[in-house]
Image (cartoon, grey):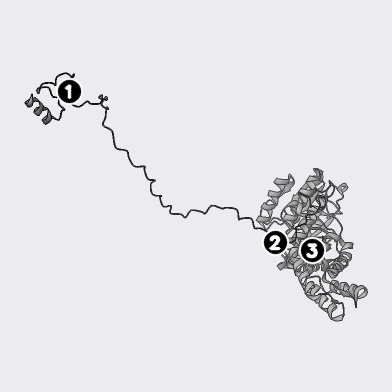
Amino acid sequence: MALRDLWNRMRGSDPAQPGQPPDPTPSEPIRPPQPPPSPPPETPPRPPEPPAEPPPPVEDPTPERPRETPPPMREPPADAPPVELPPPSQLPPMEAPPPTAEEPARQGWFSRLKAGLARSTAKLTDSVTAVFTKRKLDDAALEELEETLIAADLGVSASQRIVEGFRKTRFGKEVTDEEVKATLAEEIGEILAPVAKPLVLDTSRAPHVVLVVGVNGTGKTTTIAKLGKQYRDQGLRTGFVAGDTFRAAAVEQLQVWADRTGARFFPPAKAGADAAGLAFDALTAARSEALDVLLVDTAGRLHNKSALMEELRKVIRIIRRVDPGAPHSVLLVLDATTGQNAVQQVKVFKEMVDVTGLAVTKLDGSAKGGVVVALAQEFGLPVHVVGVGEKAEDLRPFSAREFSRGLLGLD
């Protein structure tokens, strides 16, 4: 027993207690109880991985545009007075009401005319504003006004007439530049009113022959094309005669416009062909085809005045063999950019042919639109049409009131 107890103590077991079963033999040692075995995992557990860090940003070669954020609302000062809004009846409408049915064409044309005269307006009104800054209209002011008008290409005679009108109605009175501009428009309108006459066609002549003359480069061919387009839109049967036979470009340009407008085109047989013979053949064909209007282009080589004069006279002489009353209208086309040189051109062509009316073109590219006033005062010839652009609708009948107010920048 002593040996067994000693053995048990050496094994770490307590001696047997009464009533307990005997200890196992040394060959079967007692093991501490083990927890129930758990099924082995299929794969050994892996240690938890640390959370993945976001990859470093890729640097963009172009700088990132800062995100636009609305500016913070600023509080009004404490002492700021309250903002009073007008009643709804006084608020402006969101959109301007459309013009009435009878007004849009005229309003659109006047807007284009006024815009086309902008350079001439600036040249004239800037000088007027510099002269009149709420001062009395004395002799010195009237002299400055006359110089301003002459510099704006209104001509000496028209400028003197306008100044005399100011002397009778405004002399010695204190005037502003706005009053001067309004009075100027009235005075200019009175000069232009007698010459504002449309080109009236007599279709009973079948055709009404319009001989178009002028210096090369003034816009004769383009004017013919625009008039032809308008006549065709009115239902008139129209013909174009390419009488500037020495300029191939003029012939080609007129043919293009004839194709576009559906006009009857009469080209020369060859470059440099006789213009009078072409006009004769064209008028003969136009009469047989019952055309309503025949627009005849001509040369404009003013550097050779004697040859040009003889050519124009020959054209008139030959076409009168077909119709003794032809040409029924002789339209002189003038380029507004030439300024006072247009006055000299009228003098020269009046010597060559019986000019019956004027067409003034390229007003939109000129600061010398005042020359129309000089022409009206000097010659009194009807100004049938004026042009302020490249489109057919930019050539319109001349209106004295619209032109005078447009020239002064007034509505």
Q: Is residue 63 above or below residue 55?
A: below
**Is residue 299 on the magenta stretch?**
no
Which element type, helix, strand or loop, lies under badge 2?
A: loop
Which element type, helix, strand or loop, lies under badge 3?
A: loop
Q: Amino acid at mark 3?
A: Gly
User: Do tag 3 and tag 2 residues touch (Cβ < 8 Å)?
Assistant: no
Outermost residue toward the front in this view: 18
**Is residue 67 on the magenta stretch?**
yes
The residue singled out by tag 2 in the image is: 78
Q: Residue at x 84, y 58 (%)?
A: 399
**Observer-nearest residue: 196 or 214?**
196
Q: Is residue 14 above or below residue 245?
A: above
The residue singled out by tag 1 in the image is: 17
| Horizontal and vertical percent position of residue 24 | 13, 21
Give the CA separation, mark 3 to mark 2: 46 Å
What secondary structure prevails in the magenta region? loop
Q: Is residue 15 above or below residue 281?
A: above
Give the CA separation, mark 3 to mark 1: 132 Å
Q: Residue at x 9, y 25 (%)?
A: 4
Give the CA separation, mark 1 to mark 2: 99 Å
Q: Which residues are magenta?
A: 57-81
- Give the mark nearest the N terminus, 1 or 2: 1
Q: Is residue 238 visible?
A: yes
Which element type, helix, strand or loop, lies under badge 1?
A: loop
Q: Amino acid at mark 2?
A: Ala
